[in-house]
Amino acid sequence: MAVHAHPDDESSKGAATMARYVAEGIDVLVVTCTGGERGDVLNAAAQADVDALGLAEVRRREMADAAAILGVRQVWLGFEDSGFPEGDPKPPVPEGSFAALPLETATEPLVALIREFRPHVMTTYDELGGYPHPDHIRTHEISMAAFEAAADPSAYPELGEPWQVLKVYYHFTFSYGRVRTLHEALLDRDLESPYGEWLEGWEDHERDKRITTRVPCADWFETRDRALLAHRTQIDPEGRWFAVPLEVQREVWPTEDYELAVSRITSPTPESDLFAGLRGA
């Protein structure tokens, strides 16, 4: 089970990993917490569709296309996008939006899904949300709360039989080491890199030490990119998502990376498989 904040997050974080596991016959469910209703249109080519159908409907259709490309199942948790508050001080998120709801209310439907789907492994974001969007932080909060509650017979007893998820991982897609390596690979090949300014402003170079698990999935990078491109409102095909040629990515960084946040089994790290310790069990 992969828990994400908005449609498109599943294609930018862990998509090649999911496609690999689908190819191995593993059942993968993407949980999308919000509809992305307050997102911006980042690709002008998609504006006509948004004008005709509305952003929420277009993003639902994009999500369906991306899920089909990845081969995953996908469900909506049904919460309203909180938007990304900007300003100093930042304004509060809109009343009734995902990040504004009580934690218990936002956690409940995820507990129900965990007990229904019964995943062995769950992926989500770390305590910083991967980046400080309120919906990403809230996704972390409900993921960890639901992980605990789903296994507790006294919590939400009306939502079905308890289920213990065995491993929870945090995405580390945008690690300093990966971005720096891709940047240097482009420069070494006399190609333009869009990452220089990003790297100059990178503050926490030590955070990469939290990575415990590197999943080889280079054979599915092309699938990941097709899923990303399905999110036309959010992904500019000329943007930095596609700045590094696939053959270069496969050569210099052929994995997607994670932190094993919680494990209920013996699973020595470092790992190369989210299902380490589970296969054959």
Image (cartoon, rainbow, N blue to C red):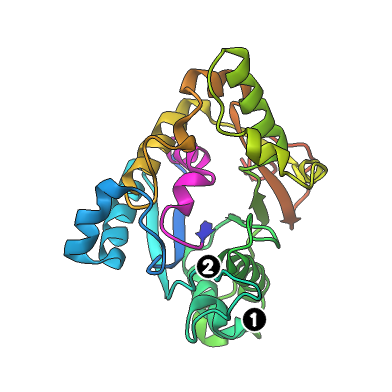
Residue 91 percent coordinates (x, y): 58, 79
Q: Establish if 237 lies above or below 158.
A: above
Report the side of 60 relative to 239 (left or right): left
Residue 149, image quadrant: bottom right
The answer for how far apart the CA atoms under marks 1 and 2 are is 36 Å
For the residue marked with disc 2, what is the amino acid?
Phe
Residue 192 percent coordinates (x, y): 53, 23
Q: Closer to the camera, 150 or 161?
A: 150
- Badge 2: residue crowd in 10 Å (few <14, some 14–19, many ≥20): some
Per the picture, the main secondary structure of the magenta-coloured stretch is helix
Taking the spot 48% from the left edge, 70% from the top edge, the residue there is 83
Residue 128 percent coordinates (x, y): 69, 61
* Count of numbered tags: 2
For the residue marked with disc 1, what is the amino acid?
Pro
Return the disc, 1 or 2, that comes first in the chain's sequence.
2
Residue at which label 1 appears: 153
Q: Is residue 20 magenta?
A: yes
Report the side of 240 relative to 168 (left or right): left
Report the side of 84 relative to 262 (left or right): left
Q: Closer to the camera, 163 or 8?
A: 8
Q: Secondary structure at mark 1?
A: loop
Residue 80 percent coordinates (x, y): 43, 76
Q: Which residues are magenta?
A: 5-24
Q: Residue furthest front?
A: 88
Q: Establish if 24 lies above or below 138.
A: above
Q: Closer to the camera, 68 or 27?
A: 68
